[in-house]
Amino acid sequence: MTAKTPFYITTAISYPNGSPHIGHAYEAIATDAIARFERLDGRDVYFLTGTDEHGQKMLQTARKEGIDVRDLAERNAGRFKEMVAKLGCSNNDFIRTSEARHHAASKAIWERMAANGDIYKDSYSGWYSVRDEAYYQESETELREDGVRYGPQGTPVEWVEEESYFFRLSAYQDRLLAHYEANPDFIGPDERRNEVVSFVKGGLKDLSVSRTTFDWGIPVPGDEKHVMYVWVDALTNYITGLGFPDENAENWRYWPANLHVIGKDIVRFHAVYWPAFLMSAGIAVPKRVFAHGFLFNRGEKMSKSVGNVIDPFTLVDHYGLDQVRYFFLREVPFGQDGNYSHEAIVNRVNADLANDLGNLAQRSLSMIAKNCDGSLPVPGALSEADNAILGQADAMAAACREAMNSQAIHQALSTVWACVAEANRYFASQEPWALRKTDPDRMGTVLYVTAEVIRQVAILAQPVMPDSASKLLDLLSVAQDARDFSTLGSVGRLASGIALPKPVGVFPRYVEEEKSEASA
Ligand code: ME8
């Protein structure tokens, strides 16, 4: 057997300055679906997520709450860890940037950049957004009528003047542009790539990479009055997680990352600063950075003051985990902004899951239980209609792979649900319930074909709905070792004659409560 190809995938690491929100949950769910897809497709996947605990934003929140920043980090990092578990994420590790291993890795990358001549001391004066933990050029900011100056993401900026170490980012402008040119897939979607290319073409200034006005961060090696700029240490988490600086570590083989999944607001850090730091340190750059869009509650930005922040834990308890995972990944084209509302979730849960897939499975499997002694019937000669629906099911694997190669998760799901819709039309037009008396053999063929289509649908639904898909595969008596993508298509056809368990419903219909808590 050939060794599996490594596939390293990461989420951004979240600031634990508050509890996790739907945006964090969305990123974790999407990244997990991609990780599971690749694993089922035979790759040796390593999936990392975690928390970004240093910086001024954390410090400010702690001060506001009157607690020690370490306690704030501890409390909320735990909540993020619980969230990924609650969401059913299959991450291999959860990194916290306050850990000793991360301090060591950050110092090592700093020392390498310094040894390469890319770090020098000067003084910084300019605009800084604590909320974005980002420096901005004056031209990127605007003074609004309220007398406050704002950065490009709409967050207030403040004037900062202090002694600082700089990273010679300007020296990387040409290398970065050459990299984007030679690797057109480095940044996705295209819109984000274009933004980055034009930003870099506009000229890069050296980047301030240390602070002296607070000490919540990783000390600069050899000058402990300075702590590293939070993004230098944050980005380094992706290599800390694989054992850096020990390049003989077992997991180092996963580097360079295949995919950093991030939100659209932090593309500049991942597609400009991060590859420049790595080039400076003599480390390979990641293969791809993909930015998803933002989620809005009925078109409004989530904010504590509007009172429309929805807690992911509540959402999962209310609608069910697989339902929430399916909804976000099917409803929002991955890479674009999206909306969610109670009605939209209920509609997807009831239409796509309870009706389309759930009813098809329940109806066909109950007929097998009642009319075929509970075992999978032997198909007779296949009709044109049988071959057409089987052909559509067999073609799903290739279409899903193609979609997932460009992180079009919604498109992979729409391919699968188009087949579910077609299978429903097939089932209705073949009328197996009428064949029961007139032509039982033909009924057996229709039920077999339907079950085989459900097998492939369930296998491909696993990355998005691991629990429900696994229940469906149990109902079809598909062995645990016959559930990966190598069984898709005609090679993995269900074996006739196998006994099937008593069918049970897998996708319950959402029924409105009198007054539902999550319907805000
Ligand atoms: O940016 N919809 O942390 P963070 C969708 N620590 N995604 C959203 C979102 C929303 N409404 N709000 C935030 C940071 N996100 C840094 C990352 S990585 C080395 C350091 C996404 O807690 C956001 O785009 O502000 C980011 O990818 C992730 O959630 C964490 O955001």
Image (tube, grey):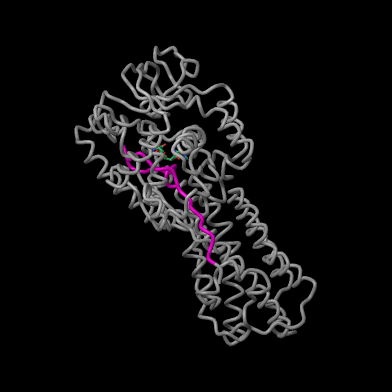
Single out the residue that lies furthest toward the right: 384
Q: Magenta span: helix, strand or loop, mainly?
A: loop
Query: Where ligand 1 lies, by quadrant?
Result: top left
| Vertical relation: 1 (above or below) 202 | below
Count of residue discs:
0
Depth check, front residue: 519 or 177: 177
| Vertical relation: 440 (above or below) 100 | below
In the displayed structure, does residue 234 sit left or right of residue 421? left
Q: The magenta stretch spans which residues?
A: 3-25
Percent position of residue 173, x then y = 54, 27
7 within the magenta span: yes
Percent position of residue 462, x then y = 53, 63
Q: Quadrant of residue 109?
A: top left
The residue that appears at 43% across and 47% down in the rendered structure is: 25
| The C terminus sits in image quarter | top left
In the displayed structure, does residue 210 sit left or right of residue 500? left
Depth check, front residue: 55 or 343: 55
Percent position of residue 164, x then y = 33, 22
59 within the magenta span: no
Q: Quadrant of residue 352?
A: bottom right
